[in-house]
Image: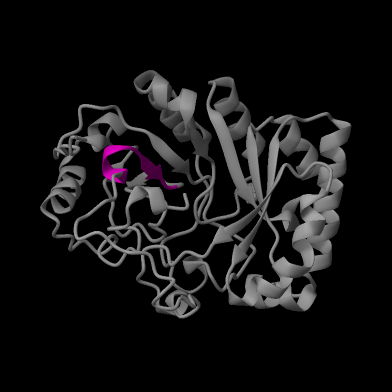
Amino acid sequence: MVEKEIRLPASNDPFGIFNIELTNRCPMNCVMCPRTNNMTRKQGDMNFELFKRIIDELVDENEDYINHQPVWLHHFGESLLHREFDTFIRYAVQKKIITGLSLNPLMLTEPVSKALLESKPDILYISLDGHDNESFEKIRGVKNAYQRSLDNLNGFLKLKQELQSDCRTVLSMIDFELNRQSIDQTRSYWESQPGVDEFLMKSFSTWDGNATDINQLEAKSEEDKPVQSDRVECNFPWERMTVLWDGEVVPCCNDYNNKLSLGNVNDRSLSEIWNGPQMKQLREEFISNHVVNPLCRHCEKLRLPRDQWDW
């Protein structure tokens, strides 16, 4: 008999960090991203001293986490827009963090590609949706950018081989109606390209489930919808947090607008925030199976068994 996991409002385990937002600025206007039409919080870039404090405390508090889980240096923005992105990556790598990043190849000019590869991240997710300028614009909202993105990506892959970089590179495309033709036309090409370690057909996400424009893009039949549990299955509040560029801490990577602030690293340590009143209240909601907070109440993963999660 498998014992049921007992969850308490206070966690005896140390915190983990799922992702750190270097910036929430972005050149894209993607139709499937809540940042485009729904994010209203102030835009800015993280200060390096703040980043160091976050990384240092994570290293000090949770050695097991940093040995087994990646820390993603992105959230709702294009991290390569940050002028010091490579300095941030180098510091995390120096601290033995498994360091990952998701990016748009439109940013991969030769100088940026060189700085990125020389900072030695462990894994990169490179998102290239569409198969020509027209299809790219429908999804990513930027005109005449597919060919530039393609050229930049090919240049990056060539440089990766020249530098003999062992950075794991995943080429991802989002699996939804606007992208199906593009996936069919380009998947085999990307799967065979030197320097691409994996092709990922990424599941479509409605994020926190509160963005109507994004919900309408999800074309799921009743048969395709996963079976939900009758109780909250999400365990994120007992495992990890997300840190925004200004030090605000939120429960997970679906919080694009700081809807559920747990505290700010400029005011309290991450360990204090981990078992602070806001986090305890969130855990109480999950334990009681009565979720009312504005971030989690409509999340499609809230009651989805973890073995069915795609991230």
The spot of residue 167 in percent (x, y) is 70, 34
The image quadrant of residue 249 is: top left
* Left or right position of 56 against 23: left
Q: Residue at left 47%, top 42%? A: 20
Q: Residue at left 80%, top 72%? A: 132
What colour scheme does the image use? one colour
The spot of residue 142 in percent (x, y) is 70, 72
| Res 206 visible | yes
Q: Residue at left 52%, top 70%? A: 36
Magenta span includes 36: no
* Left or right position of 268 against 127: left
Magenta span includes 237: yes
* Left or right position of 286 against 188: left
The answer to which of 75 and 195 lies nearer the viewer is 195
- In magenta, the rendered stretch is 236-244
Q: Residue at left 28%, top 44%? A: 235
Q: Residue furthest front?
A: 1
The spot of residue 113 in percent (x, y) is 78, 42
* Left or right position of 238 against 171: left
| Res 141 visible | no
